[in-house]
Image (cartoon, rainbow, N blue to C red):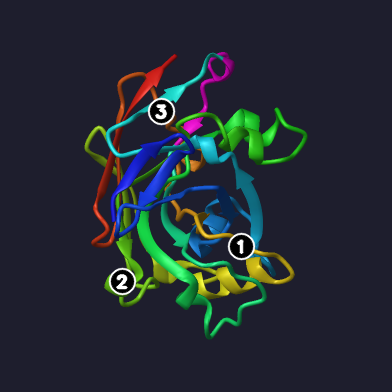
């Protein structure tokens, strides 16, 4: 399924020409065991959820635009993630049935302005994760029927060709079915909701010395057979 630019930001082009807008983005923090370890934190008991502005979504080939408000503290980071798009209205779904609500999967990059995430927003993740273009997804949305096991997909990030993240979704603390089940408890998930399922170890801020994105960097993230998502960094 194609991902296209629309009046809603990004939409999924469905069979028959209909469009399903990406109307809500839910992020999951600390969802890989080795990522928690590299930050010196324990395994969370429940999924750590946050939200991203739907207008942060952009497409394969788009620029990741670092806005002026981020440039006095240019700590913009990369995070390869498995993106999961919900295809039907869902509430209180069981873990056993949770994957039936998934429309498709895609490679995704949860671009993060670390100062805004950690210090600039009163402890909330939303601001540092929600700048325009800070959620590239694509290159397409692969139908759920073509992903036999979302818990056995290799994830990689390359910046200017250098491999910086290399892991597998089997390192998730909360698997996709658990996330959909937990997020839906007492809460209606609308079609077009994108769940960003967390990033593995190797992110820039956890490295010594840290690695942050610079003007002109080319970022390529890939999840399993879902395709390479490629974007270039541009400072506004």
Q: Which mark is residue 189?
A: 1
Q: What residue does disc 2 label?
A: 147
Q: Is residue 98 above or below residue 53?
A: below
As measured in the structure, the alpha-carbon distance from the residue carrying label 3 to the one carrying label 2 is 31 Å
Looking at the image, which is closer to me, 44 or 177? 177
| Residue found farthest to the bottom | 96
What is the x, y in percent for residue 229?
A: 29, 44
Q: Residue 40: within the magenta? A: no
Q: Which residues are magenta?
A: 69-77
Q: Residue 74: within the magenta? A: yes
Q: What residue does disc 3 label?
A: 213
Label 1 or label 3, whichever lies nearer to me, is: 1
Q: Is residue 83 above or below residue 121?
A: below
User: Are there few (<14), some (14-19), or many (20+) residues within 10 Å of tag 2?
Assistant: some
Which residue appears at 46% of the width and 77% of the height?
A: 100
Residue 113 location, quadrant: top right
Horizontal side, residue 215 vs residue 51: left or right: left
């Amino acid at each position: 399924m194609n991902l296209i630019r629309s009046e809603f930001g990004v939409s999924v082009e469905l069979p028959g020409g209909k469009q399903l807008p990406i109307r809500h983005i839910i992020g999951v923090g600390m969802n890989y065991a080795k990522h928690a370890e590299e930050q010196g934190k324990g395994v969370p008991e429940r999924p750590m959820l946050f939200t991203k502005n739907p207008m942060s979504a952009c497409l394969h080939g788009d620029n990741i635009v670092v806005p002026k408000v981020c440039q006095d503290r240019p700590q913009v980071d990369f995070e390869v993630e498995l993106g999961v798009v919900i295809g039907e209205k869902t509430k209180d779904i069981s873990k056993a049935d949770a994957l039936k609500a998934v429309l498709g999967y895609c490679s995704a990059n949860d671009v993060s302005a670390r100062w805004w995430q950690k210090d600039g927003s009163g402890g909330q993740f939303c601001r540092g994760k929600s700048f325009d273009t800070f959620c590239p997804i694509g290159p397409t949305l692969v139908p759920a029927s073509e992903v036999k096991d979302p818990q056995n997909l290799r994830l990689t990030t390359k910046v200017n060709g250098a491999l910086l993240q290399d892991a597998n979704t089997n390192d998730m603390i909360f698997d996709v079915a658990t996330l959909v089940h937990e997020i839906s408890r007492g809460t209606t998930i609308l079609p077009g909701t994108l769940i960003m399922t967390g990033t593995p170890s190797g992110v820039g801020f956890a490295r010594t010395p840290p690695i942050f994105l610079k003007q002109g960097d080319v970022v390529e993230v890939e999840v399993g057979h879902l395709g390479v998502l490629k974007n270039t960094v541009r400072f506004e």
